[in-house]
Every structure is written in structure tokens, then in C-alpha cells.
Image (tube, rainbow, N blue to C red):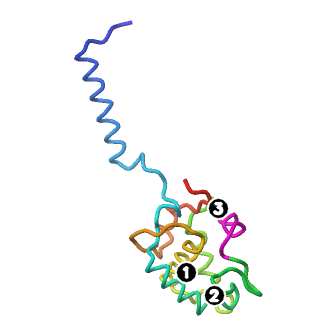
Amino acid sequence: MRQLTGARLVSGAALLWMACVTFVVAGHAQAPRTVWSGVYSEAQAYRGEKVADKSCIGCHGPRLDGGDSGPKLVGDMFLANWSSQPVSELFDWVVETMPADAPGTLSKEDAAAVLAYILQLNKMPAGREDLPGEHDALSKIEFVVEKP
């Protein structure tokens, strides 16, 4: 076994450091985005509350905590139903099937705002930017119950 000289050791350490920096800068070491990453804005959640008050309250009740014909959109059971899925799954479901009396009539912007409101009601933190209203962008955000 060969012994490393001081110069070789420093050179090797420098190469390892450069590889690590390149890996991080390239984005490969980033943690996946989750609903706990501040993926919606307070203003968007407020807009979502207004949309929910018009389009969702009839089935899901006030503050979306369950109504006569719609399930709760807050709490453990709701969270468990969507856990470990990309947010795009919930978004697509809302866009395609809601409101129940007029499926597919919510705009993507309104559906994203309602999702922001749902995240807020489920105590997930707001961030600086709105939740996107596009499937591809939302597929990169994971819906997880437990705060990382």
C-alpha cells in the first residue's frame, strides 16, 4: 500500500471538494420539494378561500371541514388519502371533478388557489410564491403528512 504525500493528499481533497460542489450546484443534492416547503402564498390561500366559499362550501362545508354531501378536506383522513403522492394528483382531481354539480368548471388558477387554501387549513406553511396551476410543476411537489 502506498503512502500519500502531503501534496497528493491536498490534491485529492481538492478534487473531492470540487466534485461535491459540482454535485450540489447541479441540483442533485437538493431535498425534494414537499407541501412543507412553503409552496403557496398567503394571498393565494386567501383567494382560494373566496373560491371555496362560492364553489365548495355547499358540499364540503364551511372551512372545508365536511358537509352533508362532501368529505372533510382537512384533518388526518384527508391527509392520509393524499400522502406520498405528487400534488399534481390532487390538482388534477379538483380540476376534472369539482365542483360536483359542475365538474371541470374551475379554472386552473382557481383550483390552485383552492389547493393553497386546503394546504393552509392543514397547517402547511406559506411561502413567497403562488402554487403553480400546471400539472408538470405540481408533479415535482410531494404531498407528505409528516413535517420533514
User: In the image, what residue type sits under mark 2?
Assistant: Cys
User: In the image, what residue type sits under mark 3?
Assistant: Ser
Residue 113 is left or right of residue 26, and the answer is: right
Mark 1, Cα crowd under 10 Å, few <14 / some 14-19 / many 20+, is many
Residue 83 image label: 3
Considering every residue shown, the one lying at the far right of the view is 68
> What segment is highlighted magenta in the picture?
73-82
Task: Give the number of callouts.
Answer: 3
Residue 96 is left or right of residue 16, and the answer is: right
Residues at discs 2 and 3 in contact (Cβ within 8 Å)? no
Considering every residue shown, the one lying at the far top of the view is 1
Q: Main secondary structure of the magenta part?
A: helix
**Residue 85 at x, y = what percent?**
61, 62
Residue 56 image label: 2
Q: Quadrant of the N terminus?
A: top left
User: In the image, what residue type sits under mark 1?
Assistant: Val
Residue 47 is left or right of residue 144, and the answer is: left
Residues at discs 2 and 1 in contact (Cβ within 8 Å)? yes
**Alpha carbons under labels 2 and 1: distance apart:** 9 Å
| Residue 145 sits above or below residue 130 on the image | above
Sequence-wise, the earlier of marks 2 and 1 is 2
Sequence-wise, the earlier of marks 3 and 1 is 3
